[in-house]
Image (cartoon, helix red, strand yellow):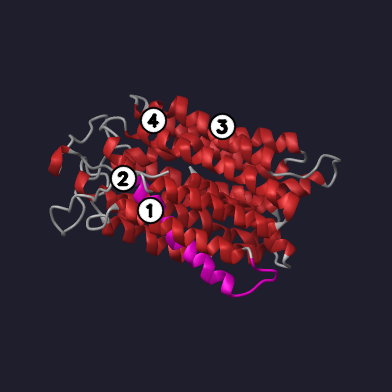
Amino acid sequence: MLHFAAIATMLLSARWIVDLGGNKSVLGWFSAAILPGIVTGAPLAGKWAARIPERSLILIGIGLLACSLFALSHYTQLSYSLLFWRFVQGFGHGMVFASIFGLAAHSIPEGKKSQGIGYIALAIQLGNLAGVSLAEGLLLRSGYADMYLGGVALSGLAMLCALGLPRRTSQPARSESGPGTADGLIPQPAQTALAIGFFFVLGGSYGTVLQLIPLLVQEAGRSSSVPATATPVMAAIFITVAVCRLLLARLADGRHQRAVLVGFMLLLICSTLAWPFATSLPQLTLIALFFALGYGLLFPGLNGLVISRVAPEWRSRASGWVVTAFDGGFFGLLLILGPVAEHFGYRTTFILLAALQLLMGGVFLQMARRIRKKRVPSMPAQGGTTRSGSRR
């Protein structure tokens, strides 16, 4: 929770970049600069977990995040060195994200992966909510420097908590030929690419919306006397996602799994199309509720469906790749959509985003329709534990 509260301070970077003299294209580059770090850090953490305790990887990752936030607090103008610190931030965040899910996956039983992932993601959403609320409070009172220093303080608390995590390493894979599978969901490179592509779009949808909300709120507030604060809209998203995962995540493990996932995917697409038509804070908040409801179940549902098809000894690496794809989209898709918003407006941007959701969602569900309710039997690992991986 504390780590994600710290990283959530970056969700208000859109205002910072604009105030430093940048435009939406610059924002896209700044957002995407974290992607190389995530693409490097998350898979490496999944690989290193067989030899290095995941607690140590988490501590290192949080430390790198804290260093990057401290460095950002000293900037008063745009500079190419910002890209370096975004890489450091991405590397550390990728390590934490992959490792914490790999570590937590020991307690998720077979047949309840979506529900378990939903509960873990619940804590993340609470961290996001707390982080954005604290960040905006510090921003309005003291400015951007104190906002980032607040993130450093949260990182310090996260490191103290991480010291209490168990020292445990993943079990080594049985062979180096390739990840084990079940029911044939991910036996081929093409299908693996489709799964990664879907999580890239899903993460990109969530990240793009969150990073554009401050600008959407400012635009809607121009015709209103209500202060243009993004916290109510973001809080609506975080709280709804949390409640959805707490109460509804088990539906993604039920007998009507495919119908549930299709329904929530359609809800996500429709709400995405509605964002640019909002003209007031209440309308943005209402759209946020529906968007969060659609996204809230999709991530644990599809993540659990994929991870449950991978042999236990390969799940840490699979989790690392899911982290890479999701966070890659979260921070990287805006690199494409930022210039679109700059030159063609928000309506074209969200129409394009909804089209990507429809395309990748349809392809992925078509591939996944062969999945049955049958679950992979738990495979005992050394010491009597089983290994399973997951993500946000």
Q: Is residue 368 magenta?
A: no
The residues tagged by marks 3 and 4 sit, at their Cα atoms, a distance apart of 17 Å
Task: For mark 4, give the secondary structure.
Answer: helix
Q: Residues within 10 Å of mark 4 (few under 14, many from 20)?
A: many
- Contact flag, marks 1 and 2 (Cβ < 8 Å): yes
Task: For mark 2, give the secondary structure.
Answer: helix
Q: Name the side, left or right, on which 277 lies relative to 165.
A: right
Amino acid, disc 4: Ala
Amino acid, disc 1: Ile
Q: Which mark, by number, is residue 252? A: 4
Magenta stretch, residue numbers = 74-103
Among the two numbered marks 3 and 2 on one chain, the one whose residue lies closer to the N terminus: 2
Amino acid, disc 3: Thr
Among the two numbered marks 3 and 1 on one chain, the one whose residue lies closer to the N terminus: 1
- Placement of 8 over or under 234, stated as above or below: below
User: Which secondary structure type mostly characterizes the magenta part of the structure?
Assistant: helix
Among the two numbered marks 1 and 2 on one chain, the one whose residue lies closer to the N terminus: 1
Report which residue position mark 3 lands on.
Answer: 240
Kindly tell me whether residue 376 is visible in this rendering.
yes
